[in-house]
Image: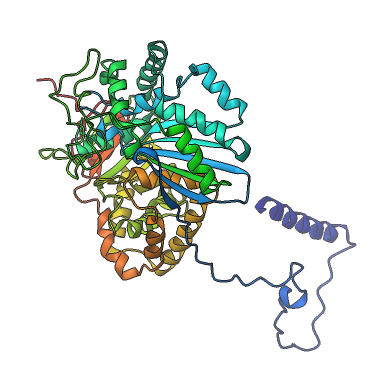
């Protein structure tokens, strides 16, 4: 637009000059006005001509949104069924959740929950891996299995007309996996190759090191869900079978079903396909308590199993199990060297709250204003104002036990120090002053939009129910959490804003040490601890 206006002005100027040059003789002096008229105010364009689009519409107040809650039903062998009928489209989505995830990995077997979940759909029931994949594709369905820190999920989406057939395949996956040696060799190799490549991804390294530095390396929350390369080579198929047997059990499972299907049909299909799925005899129930990741460490492991794999009862840990090691003191500054890298990933991590903590819904509003949206303070500062980053964000992790708060950004290497200084300043400002009135209205509107999006489709709804189940939260949790956020006040949020105070937080930088170390020292951070890409401190040579 600037160029077009500039050309128009130049053309008008040239035309006037040309007209004067082409006239005969000297240009005439302008005629003197007969009388000096009082200046008249110019009519605005809006007053002269009506807007072709019409008057600006007045927006109504946003309508409150109450997320739907499922009906809870009792299935066979202790399984719980969360059912939400949604008849708008002929679609059905199913999520099976068990509260056993990477926080239950035995010590020395990081990644066991992840690779166990990965193996479940590599052949199940009467079908090999290829046959199972083909059967899913023939029904136009999608099926996936994965692990999280506090649980594992298996998801299925399918047309209503193919629901019964597709659920039969899902039942085979969760209740009758084949776990064959020939598939294990291939899946294990792919897994270890991915772990080797992870060190080349600075974002993944930043997240891994941040959690290890905060909770302590090797602790339940201090190792990555996908595991560690050193442990992956020691995990064998017997360990996978033992973990599956202890973790994937009907008496600890929740099956969330959302879509164009009724109670009678769902319960008939579940009873038929999962009626024979039972917990192993003598296995501890959900009430048993044992430290996460430590259960069974002294138990006798089957040959080829990882240490502690036998005898562990995943997902049955008490509150202390997933917290940081009692003797662990998080470092102030950690640096992972990436020589010659053009960018650095900077992160600030400190303690958060558990997913079920009543403060967490309100902390989400604070985070939205700080780093949870495109117009957040962090993103506007580092991306829009300074141009150092393509994006900056922050989040409170959603964990069953005490989670973490983290702010992160990828920045140009030459601005690593200044960018980290600005990030710390934004966190401090939020901690000291809280939100502005304008920000409160914005984040509450953003919260409503996010909540609607979470329940927009049958797939998102069933996955959300599965996430609540794996965290041990009630099916009505989002209803009460949303009400708390919409009733939030500036004063109440200001009291909670100290949860993002960077004082005492751990700072993690992944980037070229030679270039960024002087920048870190220039902002008063001193000498960093050196860590490797697997989240382990590098011992200084003596």
Can the viewer see residue 227 in this picture?
Answer: no
Q: Nearer the viewer, residue 128 or 463?
A: 128
| Residue 224 in the image: above or below residue 11 | above
Q: Nearer the viewer, residue 498 or 357?
A: 357
User: Which residue is drawn at the image coordinates 73% and 52% (left, top)?
Assistant: 7
Q: Nearer the viewer, residue 91 or 411?
A: 91
In the rendered image, the quadrant that contains the C terminus is: top left
Does residue 12 appear left or right of residue 367 in this picture? right
Residue furthest right in the image: 24
Quadrant of the image occupied by residue 35: bottom right
x%, y% of residue 477?
A: 37, 56
Does residue 66 appear left or right of residue 349 in this picture? right
| Residue 472 in the image: above or below residue 180 | below
Does residue 274 appear left or right of residue 284 in this picture? right
Can the viewer see residue 142 in this picture?
Answer: yes
Q: How many discs appear?
A: 0
Quadrant of the image occupied by residue 300: top left
x%, y% of residue 5?
A: 70, 56
x%, y% of residue 484?
A: 36, 64
User: Which residue is drawn at the image coordinates 51% and 34% (left, top)?
Assistant: 167
How are the residues colored?
rainbow
| Residue 296 in the image: above or below residue 479 | above
x%, y% of residue 188?
A: 37, 16
């Amino acid at each position: 637009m600037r160029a077009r206006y500039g050309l128009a002005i130049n053309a008008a100027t040239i035309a006037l000059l040309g007209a004067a040059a082409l006239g005969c003789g000297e240009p005439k002096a302008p005629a003197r006005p007969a009388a000096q008229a009082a200046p008249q105010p110019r009519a605005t364009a809006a007053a002269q001509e009506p807007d072709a689009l019409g008057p600006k519409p007045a927006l109504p107040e946003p309508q409150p949104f109450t997320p739907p809650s499922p009906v809870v039903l009792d299935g066979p062998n202790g399984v719980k069924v969360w059912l939400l009928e949604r008849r708008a489209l002929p679609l059905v989505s199913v999520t099976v959740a068990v509260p056993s995830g990477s926080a239950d990995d035995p010590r020395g077997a990081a990644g066991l929950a992840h690779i166990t979940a990965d193996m479940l759909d590599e052949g199940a029931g009467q079908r090999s891996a290829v046959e199972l994949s083909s059967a899913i594709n023939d029904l136009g369905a999608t099926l996936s299995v994965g692990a999280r820190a506090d649980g594992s999920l298996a998801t299925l989406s399918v047309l209503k007309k193919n629901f019964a057939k597709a659920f039969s395949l899902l039942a085979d996956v969760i209740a009758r996996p084949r776990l064959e040696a020939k598939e294990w060799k291939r899946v294990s190799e792919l897994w270890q190759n991915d772990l080797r490549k992870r060190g080349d991804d600075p974002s993944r390294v930043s997240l891994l090191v941040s959690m290890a530095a905060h909770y302590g390396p090797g602790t339940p929350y201090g190792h990555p869900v996908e595991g560690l390369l050193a442990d992956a080579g020691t995990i064998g198929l017997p360990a996978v079978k033992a973990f599956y047997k202890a973790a994937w059990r009907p008496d600890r499972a929740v099956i969330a079903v959302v879509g164009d299907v009724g109670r009678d049909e769902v319960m008939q299909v579940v009873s038929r396909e999962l009626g024979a799925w039972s917990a192993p005899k003598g296995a501890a129930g959900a009430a048993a308590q044992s430290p996460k990741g430590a259960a069974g460490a002294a138990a006798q492991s089957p040959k080829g199993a990882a240490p502690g794999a036998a005898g562990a009862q995943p997902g049955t840990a008490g509150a202390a199990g997933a917290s940081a090691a009692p003797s662990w003191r998080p470092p102030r500054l950690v640096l992972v060297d990436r020589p010659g890298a053009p960018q650095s990933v900077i992160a600030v991590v400190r303690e958060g709250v558990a997913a079920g903590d009543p403060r967490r819904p309100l902390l989400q509003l604070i985070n939205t204003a700080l780093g949870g949206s495109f117009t957040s303070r962090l993103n506007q500062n580092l991306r829009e104002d300074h141009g150092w980053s393509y994006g900056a964000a922050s989040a409170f992790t959603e964990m069953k036990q005490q989670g973490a708060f983290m702010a992160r950004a990828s920045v140009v290497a030459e601005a690593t120090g200044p960018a980290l200084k600005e990030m710390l300043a934004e966190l401090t400002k939020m901690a000291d002053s809280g939100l502005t009135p304008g920000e409160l209205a914005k984040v509450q509107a953003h919260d409503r939009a996010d909540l609607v999006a979470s329940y927009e489709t049958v797939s998102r709804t069933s996955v959300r129910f599965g996430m609540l189940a794996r965290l041990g939260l009630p099916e009505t949790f989002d209803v009460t959490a949303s009400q708390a956020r919409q009733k939030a006040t500036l004063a109440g949020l200001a009291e909670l804003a100290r949860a993002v105070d960077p004082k005492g937080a751990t700072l993690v930088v992944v980037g070229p040490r030679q270039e960024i170390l002087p920048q870190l020292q220039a902002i008063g951070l001193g000498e960093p601890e050196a860590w490797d890409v697997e989240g382990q401190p590098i011992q200084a040579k003596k």
